[in-house]
Amino acid sequence: MGCPPTVKYDQKLVNGKSYMLVANHTSMLDIMLMLYVSRNPFVFVGKKELVKIPVFGFFYKRVCIMVDRDSTQSRTGVYRRAQKRLHQGLSICIFPEGGVPDDEHIVLDNFKDGAFKMAIAHKIPLVPITFFDNKKRFSFTFFSGGPGRVRARVHEFFETGILDEEDKGTLREEVRDIIYNDLISTVS
């Protein structure tokens, strides 16, 4: 058995409060590490194509708000389903890169707007999270990775209560810069 993940909290999540959780996405470990990092109940927003993965897909469709990224109607429906989950006291988790880049040399891909637009629309704090080691431990390349520690950092939250939808681009880039700078400045 390995050692538990190491998580540094710049700010703690408050039990019973809803958040928009966003992190870099490089590995199948990301989902499990997010469950470890956030003890608050949450649901993922993820692409519907993952339902097709044997066994994983069965569980995925029960704990995820699925989106067809090619469908405007599906993307719009995500907001209604997220609102329902937020009213139930849950948080929302989105990996804003929109998937794992095919090129594993990319440190952090561009972020899509959805998480930032949703956090502003629902006036919930946005929580940037950096996952440092997941790509090295278990990347999406078959038979890659190896044993070792897994680390995460929960950054200071961004309050969205006073923001408007036109602020989503600035928020998106500020959050991406925090995670990117953390990834390139941390020596493994």
Image: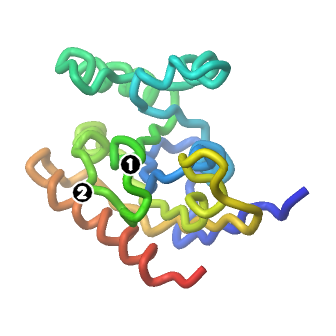
- Quarter of the image for the N terminus: give it: bottom right
Q: Quadrant of residue 6?
A: bottom right
Front residue of 9/5: it is: 5
Q: Does residue 157 appear to the left or right of 176 in the view shown?
A: right
Q: Residue at x 45, y 84 (%)?
A: 185
Q: Position of residue 78 (x, y in %)?
A: 32, 23
Is residue 49 depicted above or below 36 in this figure? above
Mark 2 touches mark 1? (CB < 8 Å): no
Asked which secondary structure carries label 2, the reply is helix
Circle 2 residues within 10 Å: few <14, some 14–19, many ≥20: some
Q: Position of residue 99 (x, y in %)?
A: 39, 42
Q: Position of residue 36 (x, y in %)?
A: 68, 50
Q: Does residue 73 appear to the left or right of 146 in the view shown?
A: left
Q: Does residue 141 appear to the left or right of 103 in the view shown?
A: right
The numbered mark at residue 102 is: 1
Front residue of 18/78: it is: 78
Q: Does residue 107 appear to the left or right of 142 in the view shown?
A: left
Q: Which residue is mark 2?
A: 172
**Of all residues shown, which one is farthest toward the front?**
143
Q: Residue at x 63, y 54 (%)?
A: 144
Of badges 2 and 1, the one in the foreground is 1
Asked which secondary structure carries label 1, the reply is loop
What's the amino acid at mark 2?
Answer: Arg
Q: Is residue 39 visible to us here?
A: no
Is residue 187 depicted above or below 71 in this figure? below
Front residue of 30/113: it is: 30
Q: Residue at x 49, y 53 (%)?
A: 26
Residue at mark 2 to residue at mark 1: CA–CA distance: 22 Å
**Of all residues shown, which one is farthest toward the right?**
1
